[in-house]
Image (cartoon, rainbow, N blue to C red):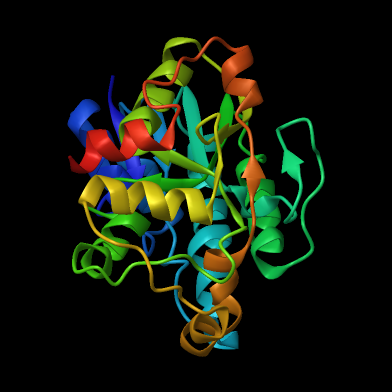
Amino acid sequence: MKVAITGASGFVSSHLIKTFTDFVSIHRDESEDEILSKLEGVDVVFNLAGAPIINKWSESYKKVLLSSRVDTTRTLVNAINKSEVKHFISTSAVGAYPDDAPFDESFKGYGEDFLATLTQLWEAEASKCTKPTTIIRFGVILGSDGGALAQMLPPFKVGLGGIIGDGKMMTSWIDVDDLVRVYEYILENKLTGTFNATAPNPVTNYVFTKALGKVLHRPTFLPLPVFVLKLLFGEGSTVLTGSKEVYPKALLDAGFEFHYPEINASLEHLLA
């Protein structure tokens, strides 16, 4: 199976290409014709392109976030529709859902903030693909070599980690190894539609923080005030302070089994 990947230099892609070794990289600045030429002989396209979401969201950076996801996906889909590609798997995020309530894929709406609008536009472009299409909504992806966890490790390792605010916000997460297995399972079973790539047991920020401290054998006494994150990231701080309680009902209904359904097991696997 030959795979084409956008965002091939990213954290998730670096894990996918260990499994899907026959791949070609597609870059965000390539034209539709350039992409089409790269799709010759390609069976599946993984769309993971997008500027980093954890950043300060100035108005100009919001345009970057939109362009790197929505415009890039539009160009990619136009090329795929002219190709012999057999399956398209596009990325989205659990930021599609509103805060402070449990959700699974049966919820067909979106939240009302910028991140939800971004995912809605992003998914709309992916849905224009005429090939079998799957949209995977990422939760917080846990891996020791990248993503949010890698950014958290330095302060936690020196005993400066702690809860965010009151620690009550929900975190919907997934072990990166389970995420790779999700891609394999979707392809093996020819699954289409929208799937939440989140472990079946979301946790509060408090529970996550204490579990991480336990694995690292470090104290977690220093809370991080929300206002500090707002000073650093502005509106972009909502990525870190939002409360997303999301469940992978569609994956579970399709028979997928998580190797790391519990936060403690995942962190032990990644860090111990």
Quarter of the picture holding the N terminus = top left
Residue 255 appearing in the image: yes
Marker count (numbered): 0
- Relative image position of residue 45 (x, y in whole percent): 41, 35
Quarter residue 112 falls in:
bottom right
Query: Where is 208 relative to 128, above or below?
Result: below
Instruction: Pick out the residue farthest to the bottom.
Output: 231
Q: Camera-side residue: 150 or 106?
A: 150
Residue 257 position (above or below residue 224): above
Q: Quadrant of the C terminus?
A: top left
**Residue at figure coordinates x 74%, y 54% from the top left:** 100
Q: Nearer the viewer, residue 11 or 266?
A: 266
Residue 110 image point, x, y percent: 77, 51
Pick whichever, 69 or 174, lies toward us: 174
Q: Residue at x 56, y 71 (%)?
A: 165
| Residue 47 horizontal side relative to residue 97, left or right | left
195 on left or right of 217: right
